[in-house]
Image (cartoon, rainbow, N blue to C red):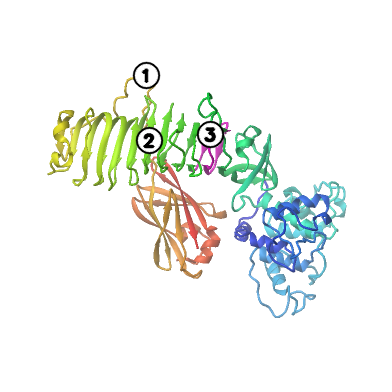
């Protein structure tokens, strides 16, 4: 595989932080930035060569180029060597030394490009010849190849003797390694037969180079792109057609083309082939099942054929089904989803967030899930088949059901949930709220713990092996017919003060204990009807980041939280304020790992409670100006967003995202 040097990949990622840089590179000198003209083409697009038109339009649609005030691009204009020097220095954000005299004999002290020329000389990108730079000379295609290869520091070892064009003999000896490398990377192309090394480069060619540079060398692209079309073996995304590697063909194939239309995606490529999907968001809706049809019959279906998304997946549409898909990050049913969702053999390595759905059902059949967070009001979550999960956290009015034979290890009912229905077998259920909570349904519960001080109205039928009231200020009512083997109340508390209707239901309670309880089974008996295929799920609770903060200018700035995304506001801080690290409060001893640009994964051991992850922990051996860096540099290094993984001693994982927001 072709490789880009780490040092220059850092510079490219910094430069690609905004598309404004690319707009500066390719907008006519008279106007910087995109014009307000038609989004699909320029007025003078017909002046471009047939092979260049598509690239120019793609570059514009991607937001990388702009026209002048009249909506023209001037595709046939030639680009001089000094213009290229200015482009590269801006693109790489090179320091531009202020010098009185240029290092080149033919660059005057008053030349507008003098500082940029010095910058690219110092960077070793453009070195001139015989003491001359030839600033106003149009750059040739072979010179452009050399500049591109030097800019990205592509490996040219052993290159130069295998140029597969008819005019390879016309390529200068010094340029041959760069020409072969640029062709192999797809950065520069010829006319199908010849490379045309001595031809002067035009603006339309540099537009094509910008598209190729981003799509071939620098993926993943910053931000999300939309899927336009998927066929067998290829996908068109953001106006660019890619081949599809075997690893993702299960997802990107023609059978999934309808459900993938308009989907948001981020991905990684090599040689213009998608080899990894790092984010996927479905946005096209199916339709309700017609009268007489089976439920979910109108759903659009994404069948992953066992393939994986190496990041987060979101369903942001109605009537969607997912099958045979692995999600190595978090999975979210978004608030945009207001109707049915169905899944079969969905494997989620991170957290599952139910922020959408309806009262008819959100179905997880034969799934492998970690923590499930239910936040949508009045949603119905149905666990079926051989599904395994670690914990369900309910923070809204909701119903949770499970097939007979399935056991849910942990359920936590939190603030915001006032009416919860549970029709399932549960090992451990905790209710922690300051408000009144009604728990209904038919459930078999091994252990129910009331932790909050709010009123708890039990309207369930079935059995509870152990009911513990941990808060002496709690109040609860017990319905007729509910059997409780052991009731545990705080030491010194009177059961009559805690259970409002104790006198009416005391015959349903076998034992009452003050502070201790008679040992009870850790897993309840599976109710009749479950058959021999009953499944008991082991407790594999993933670690959590309970709180996160940034350390900025000596102050601790608490992050706001949405799921496992923590947003640190930089409002009110100037860019020169020092960013010295992050503070995490974690639920248990674990290891947090971050991947920062080209530096690779950086890990630190954390203990239960508060921990500091310093700039040095994040940036490693990079010259970061310890004990911290300015906010401005932090945003450059981290790109405004930092993704990490929290792993406990048992190997359970939770994905964490830190966002630095102005």
Q: Earlier in the sequence, mark 1 or mark 3?
A: 3
**Quarter of the image containing the N terminus?**
top right
Mark 2 or mark 1, which is nearer the start of the sequence? 2
Residue under the point 72% across and 79% down = 101
Q: Nearer the viewer, residue 123 or 363?
A: 363
Going from N to C along the chain, the mark reached first, 2 or 3, is 3
- Quadrant location of residue 479? top left
Identify the secondary structure beneath mark 3: strand
Quick one: SS at disc 1?
loop
Looking at the image, can residue 247 be seen? no
Q: Residues within 10 Å of mark 3 (few under 14, many from 20)?
A: some
Mark 2 residue crowding within 10 angstroms, few (<14) / some (14–19) / many (20+): many
Residue 5 in the image: above or below residue 268: below
Does residue 38 belong to the magenta stretch? Answer: no
Residue 555 screen position, x and y as percent: 39, 66
Mark in front: 1 vs 2 = 2
The secondary element bearing badge 2 is classed as strand
Q: Which residue is mark 3?
A: 322
Disc number placed over residue 399 in the picture, else none: 2
Whole-number angstrom distance, CA of label 2 to CA of label 3: 21 Å
Residue 621 percent across, percent down from the top left: 51, 60
Q: What residue sits right under mark 1 in the picture?
A: 531
- Is 654 in front, or is 433? 433
Quadrant in the rendering for residue 108 = bottom right
Which is closer to the viewer, label 2 or label 3? 2
The Cα atoms of the two marked residues, 1 and 3, are separated by: 28 Å
Quick check: 290 left or right of 210? left
Magenta span:
301-329
Q: Position of residue 326 (x, y in %)?
A: 52, 36
- 317 drawn magenta: yes
Viewer-nearest of labels 1 and 3? 3
């Amino acid at each position: 595989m072709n490789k880009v040097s780490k040092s220059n990949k850092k510079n490219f990622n910094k430069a690609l932080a905004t598309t404004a840089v690319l707009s500066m590179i390719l907008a006519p000198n008279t106007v910087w930035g995109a014009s307000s003209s038609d989004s699909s083409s320029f007025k003078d697009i017909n002046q471009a060569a047939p092979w260049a038109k598509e690239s120019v339009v793609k570059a514009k649609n991607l937001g990388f180029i702009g026209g002048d005030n009249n909506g023209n691009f001037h595709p046939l204009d030639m680009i001089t060597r000094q213009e290229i020097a200015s482009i590269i220095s801006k693109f790489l954000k090179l320091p531009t030394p202020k010098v009185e005299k240029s290092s080149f004999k033919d660059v005057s002290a008053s030349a507008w490009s003098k500082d940029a020329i010095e910058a690219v000389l110092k960077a070793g990108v453009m070195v001139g010849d015989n003491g001359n730079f030839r600033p106003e000379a149009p750059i040739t295609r072979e010179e452009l190849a050399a500049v591109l290869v030097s800019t990205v520091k592509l490996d040219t070892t052993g290159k130069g003797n295998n140029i597969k064009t008819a005019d390879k003999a016309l390529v200068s000896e010094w340029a041959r390694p760069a020409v072969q490398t640029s062709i192999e990377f797809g950065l520069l192309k010829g006319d199908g037969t010849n490379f045309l090394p001595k031809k002067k480069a035009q603006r339309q060619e540099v537009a094509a180079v910008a598209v190729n540079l981003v799509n071939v060398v620098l993926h993943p692209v910053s931000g999300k792109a939309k899927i336009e079309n998927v066929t067998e073996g290829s996908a068109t995304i953001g106006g660019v057609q890619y081949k599809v590697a075997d690893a993702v063909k299960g997802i990107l194939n023609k059978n999934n083309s309808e459900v993938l239309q308009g989907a948001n995606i981020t991905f990684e490529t090599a040689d213009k082939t998608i080899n990894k999907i790092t984010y996927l968001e479905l946005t096209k809706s199916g339709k309700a099942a017609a009268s007489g049809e089976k439920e979910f019959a109108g759903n659009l279906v994404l069948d992953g054929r066992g393939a994986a998304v190496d990041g987060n997946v979101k369903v942001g549409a109605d009537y969607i089904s997912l099958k045979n898909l692995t999600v190595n990050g978090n999975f979210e049913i978004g608030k945009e989803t207001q109707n049915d969702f169905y899944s079969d053999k969905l494997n989620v390595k991170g957290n599952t967030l139910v922020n959408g759905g309806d009262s008819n059902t959100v179905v997880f059949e034969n799934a492998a899930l970690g923590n499930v967070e239910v936040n949508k009001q009045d949603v119905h979550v149905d666990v079926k088949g051989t599904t395994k999960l670690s914990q369900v956290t309910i923070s809204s009015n909701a119903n949770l059901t499970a097939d007979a034979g399935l056991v849910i290890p942990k359920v936590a009912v939190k603030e915001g949930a006032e009416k919860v229905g549970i029709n399932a077998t549960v090992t451990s259920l905790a209710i922690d709220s300051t408000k009144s909570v009604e728990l209904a349904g038919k459930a078999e519960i091994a252990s129910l713990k009331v932790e909050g001080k709010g009123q708890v109205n039990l309207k369930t039928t079935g059995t509870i092996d152990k009911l513990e009231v941990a808060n002496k200020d709690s109040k609860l009512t017990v319905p007729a017919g509910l059997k409780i083997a052991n009731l545990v109340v705080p030491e010194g508390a009177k059961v009559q003060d805690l259970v409002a209707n104790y006198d009416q239901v005391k015959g349903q309670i076998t034992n009452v204990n003050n502070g201790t309880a008679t040992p009870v089974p850790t897993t309840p008996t599976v109710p009749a009807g479950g058959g021999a295929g009953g499944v008991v799920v082991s407790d594999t609770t993933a670690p959590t980041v309970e709180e996160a903060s940034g350390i900025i200018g000596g102050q601790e700035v608490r992050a706001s939280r949405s799921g496992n995304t923590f947003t640190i506001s930089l409002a009110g801080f100037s860019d020169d304020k020092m960013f010295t690290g992050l503070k995490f409060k974690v639920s248990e001893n674990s290891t947090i790992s971050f991947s920062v640009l080209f530096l690779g994964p950086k890990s630190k051991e954390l203990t239960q409670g508060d921990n500091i992850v310093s700039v040095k922990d994040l940036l490693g051996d990079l010259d970061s100006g310890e004990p911290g860096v300015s906010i401005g540099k932090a945003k450059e290094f981290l790109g405004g967003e930092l993704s990490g993984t929290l792993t406990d001693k048992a190997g359970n994982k939770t994905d964490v995202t830190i966002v630095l927001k102005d």
